[in-house]
Amino acid sequence: KSAQVIRAEGEFVLKNGILDTRDMKAVNVSGNGKVTIKGGIVRSNSAAAIDVYNEGSVTVEGGLVETTSTVGNAIRLKDNAVGIVKGGTVQGPEGTKAYATIDISSSRGSARLEMEGGAILSRSTKDTTSAISVGSSKAECPLKMTGGRIEAVQTAISAYRNVPVVIEGGEIKSEAYAFDTYSLKITGENVKVTAGKAVFHTDVNMEGFDNQISAGTFTAGAFVEKEEGTGEHFKAALTGGTYTGGIDKEELDNSGYVAENYEVQPVEGKDD
């Protein structure tokens, strides 16, 4: 129903129908609450369409979870919350203002997201917006992707310093940047990354980068784009993968990264 909040401290399953709460959160998940979205639509214009905290969990298997707010998330994970995306679509709004579609932030807990399938979409043109934003979390792996699709106009995945992100499968596509991360590990042969501007973006000069790529296919305008006066300590260890588009082999070979056993394929019709 419209303008109704569901507070889930037990189990709640949505199989069909529309839950559109406008300016109120659609679903609050607390305690040991467990929410499963199998179909239908969950939509909100508030701080979060689905807000999960304490030991709660949300699993998206189908349907649509959507925020229409420019200052909210489709799913927000706090404390020790767990989010699992297996199917369906989770998306943010279009326009020049928006927050991350899914936000993981828990300074004292171990909030985490597992993506096995489905789609997570960020449609905003705001340059600081991402499909998934990973803030502080004590989880061993706050974000793990084994399948599914992430699409963004700006950045697909952003993660704070010392926050691990692991990608073993799936497709990531961005009109701008795929990653703004410090500690990313890509290990899956079937990982496919496409970025209009660059695989990585950075606008900081802090140390602590430990990005590692051992497999996957990457098509982008460049490997990394550094904002002026930043990126001095950026690092990425390349021990595999295939790179094409505007990614330059000479740039990678002379970058100071650990770079071996990888392949750069020239674009058809373009001089080597």
Image (cartoon, rainbow, N blue to C red):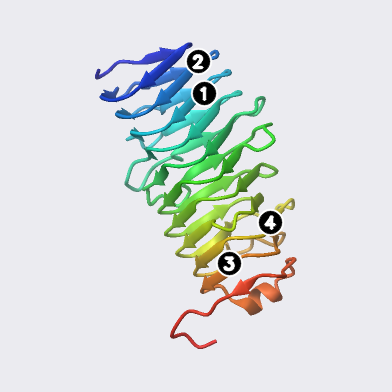
Name which residue lies at 55% across and 27% down: 82
Q: CA distance from mark 4 to mark 3?
A: 13 Å
Name which residue lies at 40% across and 35% down: 71
* First in residue order: circle 2 vs circle 3: 2
* First in residue order: circle 1 vs circle 2: 2
Q: CA distance from mark 1 to mark 4?
A: 29 Å
Q: Are marks 3 and 1 in contact (CB under 8 Å)?
A: no
Callout 2: helix, strand or loop?
loop
Pick the residue in front: 85 or 155.
Answer: 85
Q: Are marks 2 and 4 in contact (CB under 8 Å)?
A: no
Query: At label 1, which amino acid type do we have?
Result: Ser
Query: Which residue was labeled with disc 2?
Result: 33
> Mark on residue 223?
3
Name which residue lies at 55% across and 61% down: 199
Query: Which residue was labeled with disc 1?
Result: 57
Query: At label 3, which amino acid type do we have?
Result: Phe
Q: CA distance from mark 2 to mark 4?
A: 36 Å
55 lies above or below 41: above
* First in residue order: circle 1 vs circle 4: 1
Callout 4: helix, strand or loop?
strand
Query: At label 4, which amino acid type do we have?
Result: Gln
Q: Are marks 1 and 2 in contact (CB under 8 Å)?
A: yes
> Mark on residue 212?
4
**149 horizontally vs 20: left or right:** right
Query: At label 2, which amino acid type do we have?
Result: Gly
93 lies above or below 82: below
Q: Residues within 10 Å of mark 2 (few under 14, many from 20)?
A: many
**87 horizontally vs 147: left or right:** left
Say which of marks 3 and 1 sits in front.
1
* First in residue order: circle 4 vs circle 3: 4
Q: Position of residue 134 (x, y in %)?
A: 57, 39
Q: CA distance from mark 1 to mark 2?
A: 6 Å
